[in-house]
């Protein structure tokens, strides 16, 4: 099992560019999440989804968009990249909510200059 | 709302020392509690979990007990190794998932 996969691993963007961070899971999990982790900080939830076709905002959604057309995929779209979006982005999935744990991908390190 | 408060780091210990990382939580209802570990350059991995009061989670020599009376889930290990150097996150799963800010542990030989 691949688990949760993320692409790309690294990316450098110029201010104002757009990109999509890809996330896929092969565990048939209903719930998927996007977090950002800034240096020396914890995780902040950007968006989450409880099933295909359903998404909702987390703590820091501004500047991002998501879609969930299939159970497996949960891409995160950055429009008009800004230096404040320089971070490491983690995708995670879980079978349901509590009491299940989340399974994390390896992360995407994004730099906006 | 629900939240997790975690001991601030960084923590530096000598090999074979005893480790405690404190974690307390605020929650309505009966959340599940977790400890995750993040090694340098990697994503978070589940270390252990407990789903109800008085449960003890354990893995790789680490332990944590779900204490409802003190709303705590402190992480302990009797003898740390250099390979335990990582960032540790306490987390709570209630109506949503909440992570603590992480505690960086460095173990020196």
Image: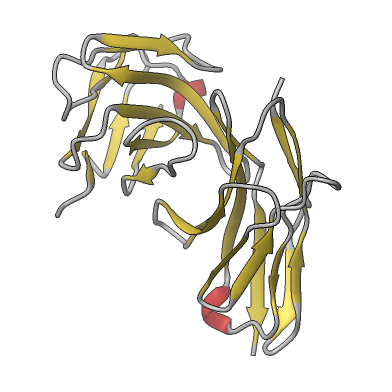
Horizontal side, residue A74 vs residue A112: left or right: left
> Looking at the picture, how far across and down is residue B34, in whole percent?
57, 50
Q: Quadrant of the N terminus of chain B?
A: top right
Q: Is residue A61 left or right of residue A20?
A: right
Q: Position of residue A105 (x, y in %)?
A: 31, 45
Question: Whole-percent x and y of residue A17?
Answer: 28, 15
Residue in front for this viewpoint, B107 or B22: B22
Q: What residue is at 29 percent from the left and 10 percent from the top?
A: A54
Q: Is residue A9 above or below residue A77?
A: below
User: What residue lies at 31% left-to-right and 33% top-to-bottom?
Assistant: A12
Does any portion of residue A64 appear in the rendered image?
no
| B55 vs B49, nearest the viewer | B55
From where the camera sits, is residue A101 visible? Answer: yes
Give x and y (percent) for residue A43: 54, 36
The residue drawn where x is 37% and y is 31% is A96
Quadrant of residue A48 within the rendered picture: top left
Which is nearer the eye, A81 or A48?
A: A48
Q: Is residue B50 above or below residue B25?
A: below
Q: How is the image coloured?
A: secondary structure
Give residue B27's quadrant in the image: top right
Q: Is residue A20 above or below residue B64?
A: above
| Count of numbered labels shown in the rendering | 0
Quarter of image, res A1: bottom left
Residue at (62%, 46%) from the top-left corner? A40
Q: Quadrant of the C terminus of chain B?
A: bottom right
């Amino acid at each position: 099992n691949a688990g949760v996969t993320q692409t790309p691993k690294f990316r450098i963007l110029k201010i104002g560019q757009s990109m999509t961070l890809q996330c896929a899971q092969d565990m048939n999990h209903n719930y998927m999440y996007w977090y950002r982790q800034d240096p020396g900080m914890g995780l902040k939830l950007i968006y989450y989804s409880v099933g295909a076709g359903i998404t909702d905002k987390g703590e820091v959604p501004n500047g991002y968009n998501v879609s969930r057309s299939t159970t497996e995929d949960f891409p995160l779209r950055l429009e008009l990249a800004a230096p404040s979006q320089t971070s490491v982005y983690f995708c995670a999935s879980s079978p349901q909510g509590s009491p299940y744990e989340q399974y994390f991908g390896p992360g995407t390190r994004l730099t906006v200059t | 709302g629900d939240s997790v408060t975690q001991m601030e780091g960084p923590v530096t210990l000598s090999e074979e020392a005893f480790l405690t990382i404190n974690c307390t939580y605020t929650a309505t209802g009966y959340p599940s509690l977790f400890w995750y570990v993040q090694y340098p350059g990697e994503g978070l991995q589940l270390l252990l979990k407990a789903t109800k009061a008085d449960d003890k989670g354990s893995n790789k020599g680490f332990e944590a007990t779900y204490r409802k009376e003190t709303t705590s889930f402190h992480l302990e290990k009797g003898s740390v190794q250099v390979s335990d150097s990582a960032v540790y996150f306490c987390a709570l799963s209630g109506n949503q998932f909440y992570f603590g800010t992480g505690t960086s542990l460095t173990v020196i030989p």
